[in-house]
Image (cartoon, grey):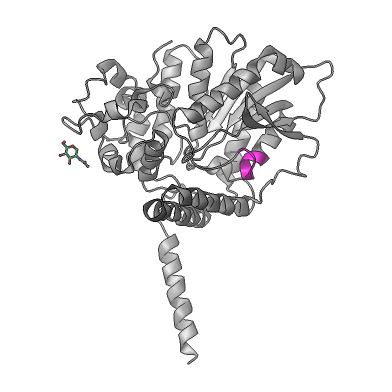
Amino acid sequence: MRLKPVVFTVLLTVAFAYYVYIPLPDAIQEPWKLMLLDAGFRATMHLVVNGLHHHGRLSIRKSTEGFEGIMKGLHSSESGGGVMPGVKVSDITFAGIPVRVYEPPAGGEGHLRRGLMFYHGGGWALGSAKKGSYDAINRMVSDELNTVVVSVEYRLYPEVHFPVPYLDCLAAAKHFLSPEVLAKYAIDPERVGVSGDSAGGNLAAAVAQEISIDDTVSVKFSVQALIYPVLQALDFSTPSYLQNQNIPILYRSLMVRFWLQYLGADLSLQPQLLANNHSSMHHSTITPELRARLDWTVLLPPKHKKSYKLLVVEKGSQGITKELPGLLDVRAAPLLAGPEVLYDVLRDDGMMYARRLQDAGVTVTNDHYEDGFHGCFSFIVWPMDFEVGRRALRGYLNWLQNNL
Ligand SMILES: *[C@@H]1O[C@H](CO)[C@@H](O)[C@H](O)[C@H]1NC(C)=O
């Protein structure tokens, strides 16, 4: 019966290949690595979904921990340790919010340093300031740019939902920007930035907006660096949402789910949001002025518009925007604020925001990586490292070097 193991192996290999293989555009480099990474990500998301259906909230947390375990394994946790021996790392709290502070080796004696507040990504549900590539990236920024980096461990779904993560980030930011704290770390008040990727980019944009209009905060962020940020939840049919809906690792349906979880909504609304039923003409709360703020037919360059059509449903579903006021809240969706990238469903969120900031007189650098994909920035540590990720990280460091 020597045949059986062979058959078994072949079947397993076929099943494995079937699970792992996804067609990818030619521009994506290192496609097999991305497929493997995605398979791991999908397997974890399946666990999360099953946890949700069968065991309630407790096991979502367990599954999420499982995900973090995978990410930890992939990234070898606390990875930066030893690489940047000079950077001093302290786990403390800012206004009661846990943060990890990275202080560069060049001491503060006599000269002031830059400051950077960082919010990690992970759909407001995953990830950690302290683990994996975020730790490595922030050590690198601290060391190379002589910057005091503060990475915020804001609370996540399912423990909390909007506005708690935003409020955690805002509280940490206000504490950081206080003259006493800046003095303590020898930071130049003119050179403090805020940054984040994905959901962290959402939090960074929302916090930067609020700080900019809060008269009680005297020191303002001088720059913001947003990496494939999430900025709006009214249109899930932007060209990038449609074009890249099946590109790993951030599928269109997954992003919608992250939004529903963040806003504390019933996940059964997912099909409605995927159909843009939640922003139909019926919703009088979405004024023409508000619609103009995310009208990609005006805000995107023609190159990215291609032949996609704006999807505004006539009837749609009644009342969703009343049930979920977060959909229209600039603290959740910073692209909706008034006038005061990638193979990525979120590409157009970022592109539209760049255009709107420019229209409002802000100097903007828009770095678009044609061969990038969502998450590439945080895949820079072997073996889950991508050349485009290292390039994007280098671009980020260079931009901060020249602008912060
Ligand atoms: C969107 O709304 C229309 C009108 O109410 C409804 O017929 C349709 O089934 C909805 N689509 C989804 C996916 O729920």
Image label count: 0
> x, y percentage for residue 156?
51, 37
Identify which residue is drawn at 48% across, 41% down.
125
Asked if one can make out residue 404 in the rendered structure from this viewpoint, the answer is no
Range drawn in magenta: 129-135
Query: Residue 128 lies in what quarter of the image?
Result: top right
* Viewer-nearest residue: 57 or 388: 57
278 left or right of 173 in image: left
Asked if one can make out residue 154 in the rendered structure from this viewpoint, the answer is yes
- In this view, which residue lies farthest toward the left? 315
Identify which residue is drawn at 55% across, 27% down.
168
Identify which residue is drawn at 49% across, 29% down.
164
Quadrant position of the C terminus in the picture: top right
105 left or right of 279 in image: right
Query: Residue 312 lies in what quarter of the image?
Result: top left
Identify which residue is drawn at 40% across, 18% down.
337
> x, y percentage for residue 56?
41, 50
> x, y percentage for residue 261?
40, 39
Query: Residue 243 lies in what quarter of the image?
Result: top left
> x, y percentage for residue 392?
57, 37
The answer to whether residue 336 is magenta is: no
- Answer above or below: position of 239 versus 210: below
- In this view, which residue lies farthest toward the bottom? 1
* Viewer-nearest residue: 222 or 306: 222
Ligand 1 location (quadrant): top left
- Answer above or below: position of 184 versus 20: above
265 left or right of 96 in image: left
* Viewer-nearest residue: 319 or 337: 319
